[in-house]
Amino acid sequence: MVFTIDVCIRLHSNKRLKYFINDESGCQTTFNHNATSFATVGTSSDELNVSIDSDDEAEREEQIIEKRRKQREQLLKRLGENNNVENKANNKSPINNTPEQNVQTTQTVLKDKVEDSVPGTSNDVSNVKEKEKSQHWDMFADHDNVNSVGTPSAGQNIKKLVPENPSLTDNWDDAEGYYRVRIGEVLDNRYSVYGYTGQGVFSNVVRARDQSRQNSDVAIKIIRNNEIMQKTGLKELEILKKLNDADPDDKYHCLRLFRNFYHKHHLCMVLEPLSMNLREVLKKYGKNSGIHINAVRSYTQQILLALKLLKKSEIVHADIKPDNILVNESKVQLKLCDFGSAAHVSDNNLTPYLVSRYYRAPEIILGLPYDYGVDMWSTACTIYELATGQILFDGKTNNEMLKFFMDLKGKISRKILRKGKFKEQHFDADFKFLYQEYDHITERDKIIVINDIKPTRDLQAELAPSNQRLAPEDAKKYSQLKDILDKMLIIDTTKRASINLCLNHPFIQEKYKK
């Protein structure tokens, strides 16, 4: 390690010399001319810049020069000794890079989610009680956010960065274990980073050019340097490999993994690059109103094909939402991504916070056994959002989510409630709903006991308002959409629509006619 040390010798009127040593990190050491020792960080450079500020004009120039020469020799001698000590210490600390072939898959998967998750941000994990950054970004954006939040090095001259030292991991990680993205850096001797595109709970994502493949674009997901996150990353890596192996011809719309490697103790996954996610598509092309019904039909079919691959591979995604579905540049093809919460279907530990809240199925909130049906429910919520530009169930709590479910589908049957592990949180012994409402007068929560809840929402009217004059073909497709959503949103999981039933539904099979 080499630091530039600036030494300034100031001659005060009392003939005492004071020294100021500044290193690149901004630290300053001050000592008098008769000091016998001092502390410094790093080693000396070949040159020391020495300046003299004298208040005593009567002092002879030769005496000042002689004092400066002696002090310079003393400083160089002491700094040289420190350099030798540090070099010896560094030589005893080998770099422990974990080779890719020694990576072992962990059986632990994080699935519990913080209840306050909202669309457009990644979920937090209940096991991890770290405070996340106030700004989260989607996995991909419309453009490369070089100066984004979370990239303290973005826009800096790379040559001015502190030299890397394997024993000082904070050189490249921030306090929360995220890798500090350096634009222009080359990862794994082949990927030249040119953009920073997103950050979530588990990782951040950069755009890079693969120098080994004609500078083709790739997206690199860099898992946080944290034991829990690393285990989750390894599990996601295993799932991606399994899905890709089950779909060698890339027909089932799950994100492709090219390869993986380790970089400065971070697991990195090289993924196919895509343009934007469906939330960004909604913001750009269908804000508050939704996108065209033909696009909704096409996207629905592709998501259902991804669900078919998941079921074939016995995997539950457990976090389907517009943010986790990417589209290509032409917006024609989509891919399901972000398998950080995914798990084998048999690994379904009960937790009321699995899946982002707005897309969370009733069986999760009630504590019922769950399987592929949770992804079907989330898909239905996503499709409704694509068609209307509105969130289907925007409850602020699990309790309010149940209220909204029943506003659409009616009261939940006792047969279902009896099996719920968490039913006591929302229903009394007589299965009356305990609606937790905030009282703005008393500024306290109050419980309203509701014996019977009847449907009050009209899904057809929400999809195609009566004040809109629709062409016959559009009206037909919206009617079909309402029917398929009704079947996908059945609260009883044993009666909820299957993937094949949805793929064979007229909404999918009958193509849109202009």
Image (tube, rainbow, N blue to C red):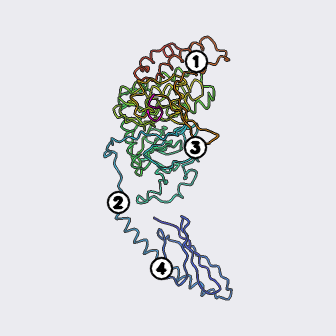
Q: Whole-Å distance between the Cαs marked 2 and 1? A: 66 Å
Quarter of the image where the N terminus is located: bottom left
Q: How many marks?
A: 4
Residue carrying label 2: 94
Pointers 2 and 3 in contact (CB under 8 A)? Answer: no
Residue carrying label 3: 145
Q: Which residues are magenta?
A: 423-430
The label on residue 311 is none
- Residue at the outermost top position: 472
Residue 246 picture quarter: top left
The label on residue 460 is 1
The mark that comes first in sequence, 2 or 3, is: 2
Give the label, 1 or 4, closer to the camera: 1
The amino acid at mark 1 is Gln
Instruction: Answer yes or no: is residue 91 visible.
Output: yes
Main SS class of the magenta portion in the image: loop
- Classify 430 as above or below 495: below
Residue carrying label 4: 37
Q: Whole-Å distance between the Cαs marked 1 and 4? A: 82 Å
The mark that comes first in sequence, 2 or 1, is: 2
The mark that comes first in sequence, 2 or 4, is: 4
How many neighbours does mark 1 have within 10 angstroms: few (below 14), some (14-19), or many (20 or more)?
some
Q: In what element is the residue under mark 4?
A: loop
The amino acid at mark 3 is Asn
The mark that comes first in sequence, 1 or 3, is: 3
Give the label, 2 or 4, closer to the camera: 4
Q: In what element is the residue under mark 1?
A: helix
- Would you say 172 lies left or right of 227 here? right
